[in-house]
Amino acid sequence: MAERILTFVLLICASLSVLVMWVVQSNISTARETITADAPAALNYLLQSDHNVDQFIDSIRELQLAGTDDVSRASMELDVRNRFDVMWSSFYIFRMQFPMSTASDVLTDDFINNAEQFLKDAEPKMHPDHEYTSEDLSELVKRSRSVSNALKRLGHGYFINAAEQTDAVEEQISELSGYMRIFIALLMLTGGLGIGLLIRSNIRTNALFHEAQSARSELAYTVDELRSGRREQKAKDSFIASASHDLRQPLHALGLFLNSLKNEVKPSGRRALSEAMECADALNRLFNSMLDLSRLDAGVVAIEEENFDLGELLKNLHNQLKPSASGHGIFLRLEGREEAFAKTDPILLSRIIRNLVENAIAHSGATNVTIEFRRVRDQFEISVQDNGKGIDKKEHKAVFSEYYQIGNPERDRSKGLGLGLSIVKRLSQLLDIDLKLRSSPGTGTRFSMTVPIGEAEAVQSIIIPSQPMKAENRNYGAVIVVVDDDRSIRKAMGMTLDYLNYQSVCAECTDEALELLAERQLEPDLIIADYRLRDHLTGDKVIQELRAAIDRDIPGLIVTGDTSPQRVAELASTGIEILHKPVESDMLNAQIKEMLAANEAA
Amino acid sequence: MCGVFAVGLMLNVAWALDPAQGEVLLVIDGNISASNAMRDGQPVAEFDLDMLKAFGSTSYTTSTPWTVTSTFAGVRLNELLAVVGADVEKNKVKAFGLDDYWYYLDSVEATKYPVIVAYEKNGKPLSLRELGPLWITFPWDEYPELLTAKNKAASVWQLVRLNVQ
């Protein structure tokens, strides 16, 4: 809108300046005419003519003074005639040049008529044969004087006229300079507005250009996401995250309830209980895998690269996985003798290999699985090979996607969800490891990868991926506050903590917790809170509130079923310990003990 | 020896022109390198009509601010001045009329344009009444750019004397 007004003003200024220029131009022409007509030149003609008349009179005077028998009388007469001709020509010029506006018509006419009459009357006396009488000469002088007077009157007329014209010119010039000032102002305004508009449009063009660019890159990103399937992936991730949150709550409670039953059931019910616990365990593992995936997607998995003994790591893995393999009737071998120091993240690498081996055990239908490592130039090649049914070439890509299982079209849940290889793929991408798959139906499958060689001297410690610790059910008598808005979870947690011989104080919110503590005259040693509570309250806030109320830096633990990558990242930044639902009682106990010990040490 | 040589050289230069035989129409005086007469103790160059005609005539037909279209013939101003070693564009040359009018010729581009000292109009000698016998004229019609106030003032009629400074 403002731009339109600006443009309008600009156009008006431009047309006004053109108009003013036209006025100036026409004024200049008028002034020029006036100046041209006004005449120093005319004045000079008058002076010159007057001088010529004077010289004519002088030549006659000389002739009057000369005697009739003077020898130079002839040349004197010639001089008179010549001076007459000169005068004649100057009058002729005057008549040609200046019968115009330079003086009043009356005076000009008076002079011209006077001069013409004089020239006409004098003409016969200018014949070479004419004999001059003294009367002739006196008459010529008298008439010349009369012409000269007419000239003087005309000159005076010029003078009067010149004064008027000078003033007129002056006036015109001041008018002109006024117009010029307006013109310059308008021109400057026009120029300024023009420049302003130009800058404005330039800025707008730039802004549009940037907008277009960002829109284009956004579009390109979206297209790229659509093409690569990342968009679907995200949608799936968020669906899984929210679904698993809802599923985790009851599962968590279920595990806690089952654990607390362990020592209560009759021997006849033990088998059913242990089967139920196994089922719960399988479900747990499944959710842990999904959590791993969401953690990987959230980018909160930190890579800690170090030099380590690869042989030692693989030997440990072999020992851990061998019983499970034997359980499936599979012989698990480890090949590779040399000392091998590698440089990468040992924990993440061991998860890759563990997943590959577990995958081979569970899905390949093999009888032999071999873990092998060997040096290839300046790298170590690690491979996991089975002699199972193999994978068709066209399925090579698909095996790395989530929920994909070969030979499980009926989706037998006992064989898992098929997340193992997609975790492997993401981990290897994270570690920048090139994972290779070589397989065809009937010839078995070989996954291989290479890791950089490390330095033996730089090895700090031997990393042994540990099995979950067995809980020691010792009575600490520690007071643990549980804040959860879900009644069944509160109950289950209370039972579990009681079973683990802690004193539990279970509350729905901060105020209730404080009330209960006061009632029972207890001082809390640890706070366990759910992350997402009623009324937009969060676990970390509850912990802070309790710490503030009791005025002590009580260790805090958040148990959450929320696996969305964003939430995981948020929690990782609060500095409070985190456990993901479902939590087994052993794991919970180990975490509690660790935190209490750390707090005591501090 | 030296003195004799110097006098000889002076005489040689000063008397390079033949003396005028007929009526003298034009006198060139002042800072000149050739002369054929002495006036008031100064060497001057005097020209009669035959001497002027001897340069070869340049002619053109033109109107003037004071006359209708006519054919003028005369001597090129720069050629005439070259005889006495002068140049309107290098020297200051003052042109005098019979009526004592004078004007400087330094703004006259005599080399670029055929500016002449005319002695004939329409094949006849210029009379006094026709602004003769000599008149500095410009080819006004062919070169309208010559119609300036200075050139008009420099178009000296009834020319009798050129003073070179």
Image (cartoon, rainbow, N blue to C red):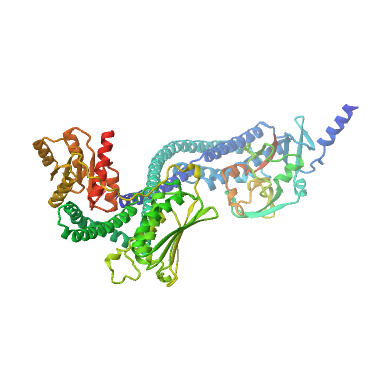
Give left or right: position of A432 versus A512. right
Quadrant including the C terminus of chain B: top right
View extreme (right): residue: B1
Name the residue located 60 percent from the left edge and 38 percent from the top edge.
A52
Residue in the picture at 18% in, 58% down: A270
Which picture quadrant has residue A239? bottom left
Q: Position of residue A391 (x, y in %)?
A: 41, 69
Q: Quadrant of the N terminus of chain B?
A: top right
| Viewer-nearest residue: B11 or A447 | A447
Q: Quadrant of residue A297?
A: bottom left
Q: How far across and how far down the image is residue A501, in percent?
A: 18, 43
One can see residue A110 in this view: no
Q: Residue A402, image x and y in percent?
A: 33, 63
Number of marks drawn? 0
Task: Give A199 or B27, whichever is nearer the viewer.
Answer: A199
Taking the image as shown, residue A548 lies to the left or right of residue A414, namely left
Q: Nearer the viewer, residue A191 or A296?
A: A296
Taking the image as shown, residue A519 lies to the left or right of residue A228, namely left
- Determine which quarter of the picture holds residue A550: top left
Q: Is residue A468 visible?
A: yes
Which residue lies most toward the front here? A267
Pick the front one: A126 or B5: B5
The spot of residue A149 in percent (x, y) is 51, 36
Task: Tell me if residue A409 comes above or below residue A382 in the rendering.
Answer: below
